[in-house]
Image (cartoon, rainbow, N blue to C red):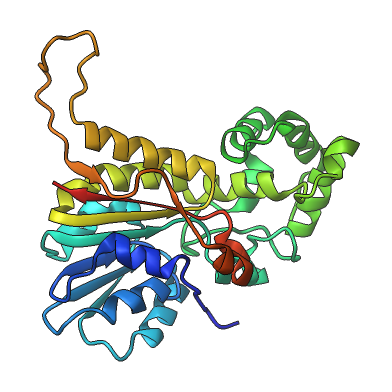
């Protein structure tokens, strides 16, 4: 299927990034290039855009979508390596960095990628298909206790122990449909009647574990201020509470600076604020966008400026 990318909150993102025609920008999660196209469209010949993604298919699609722009560089890598990416490619201090977190529409809709509980496919869930760890490994090789921890921590699933025990008993499990049925069977009757699909939280948890998503966000955001020029912007779109919590906490820490205990009369740590919050609270998609693009319903945008 074709790799398409409907950018979430496009106007809000451009406003948050405050794109300058001669600026240098980095889209850390390019996907199909939806946001990248909007950024590139606002750059002059002196401006530059770096498109980063760990998914080869995503970059190929982005190259086609942005084929009319000559000032774009494509880099296959995990944004967790943000500092190394900048150093390896000789990228100057950035005018803006965009993170559009979570799984792309293409990855969800392409059955063979194994992300969705709605379509039958081999267990995979790798954003980078050359990576070693897949959903099959997590589901079939993790001890039940470790699997329960993953499901509880990354899926915020209250029935994690029951689900992990059912998975362990049913091994080997080869497909997404098998896994979804096992999860559903492990749930109490009341939970099965909830509006949300019984497997949603567990699939999210396994995907996060396979791709190391939360660690990558924390690593990249902690170094992002060092890579951004003064006055440059960092904008992040998250899609669930675990991601948003990390973004909120790191932005708050960098905006505060001083880490001394409140009872200290004067600062002794010497740490200065590195960011100024652009968004106070998370920005969400308009009702119209949510109706037109259901995947925008859970999106939250936060942005900060380097000072």
In which quadrant of the rendered view does residue 11 lie? bottom left
Vertical placement of residue 41 versus 187, above or below = below
Q: How many marks?
A: 0
- Residue 241 pos. (x, y %): 52, 42
Give me the residue at 56% from left, 83% from top. 2
- Residue 134 pos. (x, y %): 57, 53
102 or 231, which is in the foreground?
231
145 or 214, which is in the foreground?
214
Seen from this angle, which residue lies furthest front? 287
- Residue 122 pos. (x, y %): 69, 62
Quarter of the image with the N terminus in it: bottom right
Residue 185 visible within the image: yes
Seen from this angle, which residue lies furthest right? 189
209 or 221, which is in the foreground?
221
Seen from this angle, which residue lies furthest bottom? 68
- Residue 115 pos. (x, y %): 63, 60
Residue 175 visible within the image: no
Q: Is residue 268 left or right of residue 159?
A: left
Give me the residue at 18% from left, 71% from top. 20
Q: Is residue 178 left or right of residue 146?
A: right
Vertical placement of residue 42 versus 13, above or below = below
Give me the residue at 50% from left, 64% from top. 129
In which quadrant of the rendered view does residue 192 lie? top right
Give me the residue at 83% from left, 45% from top. 184
């Amino acid at each position: 299927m074709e790799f398409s990318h409907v950018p979430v909150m496009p106007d809000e993102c451009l406003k948050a990034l405050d794109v300058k025609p001669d600026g240098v920008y980095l889209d850390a999660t390019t996907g199909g290039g939806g946001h990248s196209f909007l950024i590139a469209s606002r750059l002059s010949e002196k401006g530059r855009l770096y498109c980063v993604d760990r998914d080869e298919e995503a970059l190929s699609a982005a190259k086609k979508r942005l084929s009319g722009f000559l000032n774009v560089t494509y880099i296959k890598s995990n944004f967790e390596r943000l500092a190394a990416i900048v150093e390896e490619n000789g990228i100057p201090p950035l005018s803006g960095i965009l993170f559009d977190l979570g799984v792309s529409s293409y990855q969800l809709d392409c059955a063979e990628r194994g992300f969705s509980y709605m379509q039958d496919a081999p267990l995979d869930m790798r954003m980078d298909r050359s990576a070693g760890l897949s959903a099959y490994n997590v589901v079939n090789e993790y001890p039940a206790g470790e699997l329960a921890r993953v499901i509880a921590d990354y899926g915020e699933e209250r029935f994690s122990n029951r689900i992990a025990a059912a998975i362990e008993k049913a091994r080997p499990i080869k497909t997404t449909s098998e896994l979804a049925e096992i999860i559903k069977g492990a749930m109490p009757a009341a939970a099965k009647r909830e509006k949300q699909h019984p497997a949603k939280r567990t699939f999210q948890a396994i995907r996060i574990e396979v791709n190391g998503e939360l660690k990558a966000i924390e690593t990249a955001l902690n170094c992002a201020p060092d890579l951004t020029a003064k006055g440059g912007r960092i904008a992040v779109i998250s899609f669930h509470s675990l991601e948003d919590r990390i973004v909120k906490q790191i932005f708050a820490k960098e905006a505060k600076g001083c880490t001394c205990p409140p009872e200290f009369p004067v600062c002794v740590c010497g740490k200065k604020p590195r960011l100024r919050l652009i968004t106070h609270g998370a920005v969400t998609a308009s009702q119209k966008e949510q109706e037109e693009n259901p995947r925008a319903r859970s999106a939250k945008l936060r942005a900060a400026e380097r000072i």
